[in-house]
Amino acid sequence: MDKADVVIVGAGPAGSSAAFFLAQQGIEVVLIDKSHFPREKACGDGLGPRAIQIMNKMGLGNWLASGSYYRCNRVRMVSSMGSRFEAHIPAEDTPYPYFYIVSRRDLDHKLVETASSAGARVYMGHKAVSPVVSNGTVKGVRTSCNGEETEISCKILVCADGTNGSFAKYLGLQSVKPHAFAARAYFSNVKGLDDCINIYIDERIPEGYAWIFPVSETTANIGLGVSCPKMKQLDVDVKRLIRWFVSEKDTSPIDLSDAAAATDIKGAHLRMGYGRYKSVADGVLLVGDSAGLINPLTGEGIAYALESGEQAALVIRHAFSKGDISERALMLYQNHLNKNFYMNHRVYELIRFGLANYTWMDKLIKKGAKHPELAAKFTSIMMSTAKPSSIFMPKMLRCMLF
Ligand SMILES: Cc1cc2nc3c(=O)[nH]c(=O)nc-3n(C[C@H](O)[C@H](O)[C@H](O)COP(=O)(O)OP(=O)(O)OC[C@H]3O[C@@H](n4cnc5c(N)ncnc54)[C@H](O)[C@@H]3O)c2cc1C
């Protein structure tokens, strides 16, 4: 039987980050994933300032800046009622006031390689099928690879199996339920792409938005996300909506008249709104989407997957140094998440609730066009580089009213 100090289930950004930071501290770690990397993953591929910050910590700053990946410095928000603002990502709120678009095929593969170079043992094509539990405590994981079952014993298990994962429930923990569904495809022959990421608000996209993220000067990741309750209530077919967006919607200044689909449309649910359930148990931690860390306003999740992986690694090292891996000791991790995400996610949910009214969203964009400081603040809030509550500062409320 194989063994390690820590086993991590899932090698997305959360799992790879946890593996990297654990291995860097000399902790023996095994990272498993049911897929073989490089692999596709449905995503907008947007890496905002917070994701870039932690990737720099992982030594990947030069890789990002190598010139292979498209960099945007501005956000363009467009409402179908005619209003539009363009704003730079405010440099006063982050040392990285830009946004890279990196395919998840490349990103996730690079992160796994980085974890492996730091010393993590990586097992691809290994599906975690069940935890090994003894006296009520998790002692390892049973995996299946090419039809063969094996066991890896460990002291701590990190659950990083993402939005579709179900491993948390085997560990006796509840996961945040999906609140939205998003899908995307890559399109070539896109004209008018510049250094903006493009966000479109439209009545036909209920409680959500569409995006055009440039991948090159003529190729874009185009997709949209909608809330699950609205999707059900209005019987929304997201794939059909994307086809409508590309073929019929006026997306100026981006011209999609000759755009051709380069891939199929792929999508997934989003587990957003951290804080309703526990993220730790004896010898267990949940990271990334598995802990519901996706931003409830924007759907951004990579940054928080990376951040939670790092934080989990710090708390695990501390727990090992104290010889206590009980839920009580691991609460340090939960406390950190609570401090960073709990209130912010409630405020993001409140803003989402307000802006679900399409005409309010249109008004906000109109006011953003009139008051650059409001556009800049809203951009920082979307990038999670400013507190979401800062939208309620008197100065911002005045911009919205007048
Ligand atoms: C259409 C769409 C667009 C998005 N756009 C953006 C964006 O532009 N920017 C952004 O920041 N976020 C975006 N997100 C959210 C982002 O994709 C997630 O927040 C992010 O992938 C979370 O990382 P993770 O490591 O927690 O999970 P994942 O990336 O989902 O990784 C989980 C891994 O676990 C593996 N796994 C699952 N079960 C098992 C098992 N039993 N055994 C072994 N392995 C297992 C999977 O194969 C997978 O590799 C988008 C999401 C969608 C659906």
Image: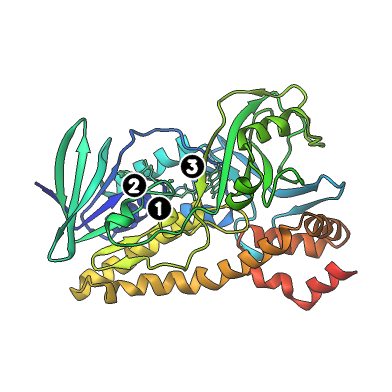
| Mark identifier at residue 63 | 3
| Amino acid type of the residue tagged 2 in the rendering | Gly
Count neighbours of disc 2 (C-alpha within 10 A) and say few if under 14, some if 14 to 19, many if 20 or more. Answer: many
Mark sitting earlier along the chain (3/2)? 2
- Side of 227 where 146 appears, left or right: left
The reply to whether the residue tagged 1 has its Cβ within 8 angstroms of ligand 1 is: yes
Identity of the residue drawn at 40% across and 44% down: 111
Q: Residue furthest left?
A: 1
Q: On the image, numbered disc 1 is attached to which residue? A: 14
x and y percentages locating residue 43 in the rendered image: 53, 41
Label 3 sits on a secondary structure element that is: helix
Q: CA distance from mark 1 to mark 2?
A: 8 Å
Q: Position of residue 58 (x, y in %)?
A: 41, 53
Q: Would you identify the image quadrant in which residue 319 lies?
A: bottom left
- For mark 2, give the secondary structure: loop
Q: Is mark 2 within 8 Å of ligand 1?
A: yes
Residue kind at label 1, given as amino acid type: Ala
Q: Are marks 1 and 2 in contact (CB under 8 Å)?
A: yes
The spot of residue 311 in percent (x, y) is 39, 64
> Gap in Å between the C-alphas at discs 1 and 3?
19 Å
Label placed on residue 10: 2
Residue occupying image coordinates x 42% and y 41%: 108
Mark 3 or 2: the one toward you: 2
